Amino acid sequence: MGLFGPPDVKKLAERGNVQKLLKVVRYERSSQIRRQAVCALGKIGDQETIGGLVQALKDSNNCVRQEAETALREIMDRLVQVFKDSSQVGKEEAEGILRSMLDGLVQALKGTTS
Protein backbone atom coordinates (compact mmCIF):
# COMPACT_ATOMS: atom_id res chain seq x y z
CA MET A 1 0.00 0.00 0.00
CA GLY A 2 2.64 2.51 1.01
CA LEU A 3 5.87 2.92 -0.91
CA PHE A 4 8.01 2.28 2.16
CA GLY A 5 6.24 -0.59 3.86
CA PRO A 6 2.87 -1.83 4.97
CA PRO A 7 0.07 0.54 5.93
CA ASP A 8 -0.01 1.76 9.51
CA VAL A 9 -3.49 0.60 10.52
CA LYS A 10 -3.19 2.05 14.02
CA LYS A 11 -2.55 5.57 12.67
CA LEU A 12 -5.32 5.26 10.11
CA ALA A 13 -7.73 4.14 12.83
CA GLU A 14 -6.67 6.95 15.19
CA ARG A 15 -7.36 9.45 12.42
CA GLY A 16 -10.68 7.78 11.56
CA ASN A 17 -9.54 7.45 7.96
CA VAL A 18 -12.25 5.07 6.77
CA GLN A 19 -11.40 5.41 3.08
CA LYS A 20 -7.81 4.26 3.56
CA LEU A 21 -8.87 1.50 5.97
CA LEU A 22 -11.28 0.26 3.30
CA LYS A 23 -8.33 0.04 0.90
CA VAL A 24 -6.26 -1.82 3.48
CA VAL A 25 -8.99 -4.47 3.72
CA ARG A 26 -7.88 -5.42 0.18
CA TYR A 27 -4.13 -5.34 1.01
CA GLU A 28 -2.90 -8.60 -0.53
CA ARG A 29 0.48 -8.89 1.18
CA SER A 30 -0.69 -9.53 4.73
CA SER A 31 -3.81 -11.12 6.15
CA GLN A 32 -2.75 -9.81 9.57
CA ILE A 33 -2.90 -6.23 8.32
CA ARG A 34 -6.26 -6.89 6.63
CA ARG A 35 -7.56 -8.32 9.93
CA GLN A 36 -6.36 -5.23 11.82
CA ALA A 37 -8.10 -2.98 9.29
CA VAL A 38 -11.33 -4.96 9.63
CA CYS A 39 -11.11 -4.66 13.41
CA ALA A 40 -10.60 -0.88 13.14
CA LEU A 41 -13.54 -0.52 10.76
CA GLY A 42 -15.70 -2.48 13.17
CA LYS A 43 -14.81 -0.13 16.01
CA ILE A 44 -15.67 2.88 13.86
CA GLY A 45 -18.88 1.10 12.94
CA ASP A 46 -20.61 3.72 10.85
CA GLN A 47 -22.53 3.23 7.62
CA GLU A 48 -19.45 3.90 5.50
CA THR A 49 -17.65 0.88 6.98
CA ILE A 50 -20.33 -1.72 6.23
CA GLY A 51 -19.37 -2.41 2.62
CA GLY A 52 -15.75 -3.12 3.51
CA LEU A 53 -16.76 -5.39 6.36
CA VAL A 54 -19.16 -7.31 4.14
CA GLN A 55 -16.42 -7.60 1.50
CA ALA A 56 -14.08 -8.99 4.16
CA LEU A 57 -16.54 -11.84 4.75
CA LYS A 58 -15.23 -13.20 1.43
CA ASP A 59 -11.52 -12.87 2.32
CA SER A 60 -9.30 -15.87 1.60
CA ASN A 61 -8.11 -15.89 5.22
CA ASN A 62 -10.35 -17.40 7.87
CA CYS A 63 -9.16 -15.01 10.61
CA VAL A 64 -10.08 -12.00 8.49
CA ARG A 65 -13.52 -13.48 7.78
CA GLN A 66 -14.08 -14.18 11.48
CA GLU A 67 -13.03 -10.64 12.43
CA ALA A 68 -15.47 -9.23 9.85
CA GLU A 69 -18.27 -11.40 11.20
CA THR A 70 -17.52 -10.29 14.76
CA ALA A 71 -17.37 -6.62 13.73
CA LEU A 72 -20.70 -6.79 11.91
CA ARG A 73 -22.31 -8.57 14.85
CA GLU A 74 -21.03 -5.92 17.28
CA ILE A 75 -22.29 -3.10 15.05
CA MET A 76 -25.68 -4.78 14.88
CA ASP A 77 -25.75 -5.15 18.66
CA ARG A 78 -24.97 -1.43 19.07
CA LEU A 79 -27.73 -0.54 16.61
CA VAL A 80 -30.25 -2.66 18.48
CA GLN A 81 -29.30 -0.77 21.63
CA VAL A 82 -29.91 2.50 19.77
CA PHE A 83 -33.43 1.31 18.97
CA LYS A 84 -34.02 0.70 22.65
CA ASP A 85 -32.52 3.94 23.98
CA SER A 86 -32.72 6.67 21.33
CA SER A 87 -35.00 9.34 20.02
CA GLN A 88 -36.82 8.84 16.72
CA VAL A 89 -33.93 10.49 14.84
CA GLY A 90 -31.44 8.01 16.31
CA LYS A 91 -33.74 5.14 15.48
CA GLU A 92 -34.10 6.29 11.87
CA GLU A 93 -30.32 6.53 11.51
CA ALA A 94 -29.87 3.07 13.03
CA GLU A 95 -32.53 1.70 10.71
CA GLY A 96 -30.68 3.09 7.69
CA ILE A 97 -27.42 1.48 8.79
CA LEU A 98 -29.15 -1.85 9.44
CA ARG A 99 -30.76 -1.75 5.98
CA SER A 100 -27.36 -1.04 4.45
CA MET A 101 -25.87 -3.97 6.37
CA LEU A 102 -28.61 -6.33 5.28
CA ASP A 103 -28.39 -5.24 1.65
CA GLY A 104 -24.63 -5.81 1.71
CA LEU A 105 -24.99 -9.21 3.33
CA VAL A 106 -27.59 -10.28 0.77
CA GLN A 107 -25.29 -9.17 -2.06
CA ALA A 108 -22.36 -11.03 -0.48
CA LEU A 109 -24.46 -14.19 -0.19
CA LYS A 110 -25.58 -13.88 -3.81
CA GLY A 111 -21.95 -13.57 -4.82
CA THR A 112 -21.02 -16.80 -3.04
CA THR A 113 -23.90 -18.86 -4.41
CA SER A 114 -23.73 -17.90 -8.09
Image (tube, grey):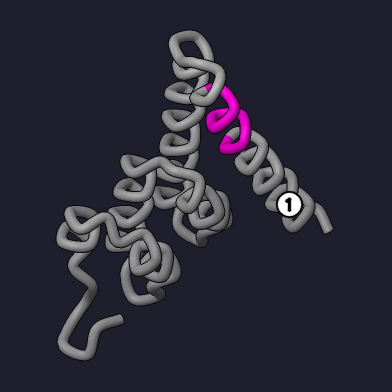
Q: How many C-alpha atoms fall within 10 Å of the one at disc 1: few (<14), some, or many (≥20)? A: few
Give the image location of residue 12, x and y in percent.
Answer: 23, 62
The kind of secondary structure element at disc 1 is helix
Taken as a whole, is the magenta stretch helix, strand or loop? Answer: helix
In this view, 101 is above or below 32 = above
**Part of the protein shown in magenta:** 91-97
Q: Please give the residue where the numbered disc 1 appears in the rendered image.
A: 107
In this view, 69 is above or below 111 = above
Q: Quadrant of the N terminus?
A: bottom left
Q: In which quarter of the image is the C terminus?
A: bottom right
Please name whichever residue, 40 or 60, is drawn nearer the observer in this view of the structure: 40
Q: How many marks?
A: 1
For residue 109, side relative to residue 74 (left or right): right
Q: What residue type is labelled 1?
A: Gln
Spot the residue most to the top: 84
Give the image location of residue 76, x and y in percent.
Answer: 51, 28
Spot the residue most to the bottom: 3
Give the image location of residue 97, x and y in percent.
Answer: 57, 37
Q: Which residue is drawn at 30% across and 61% down?
A: 17
Q: Residue at x 73, y 52 (%)?
A: 107
For residue 12, side relative to residue 81 (left or right): left
Q: Which residue is drawn at 16% across and 61% down?
A: 11
31 in magenta: no
Please name whichever residue, 111 or 49, is drawn nearer the observer in this view of the structure: 49
Q: Which residue is drawn at 34% across and 69% down?
A: 20
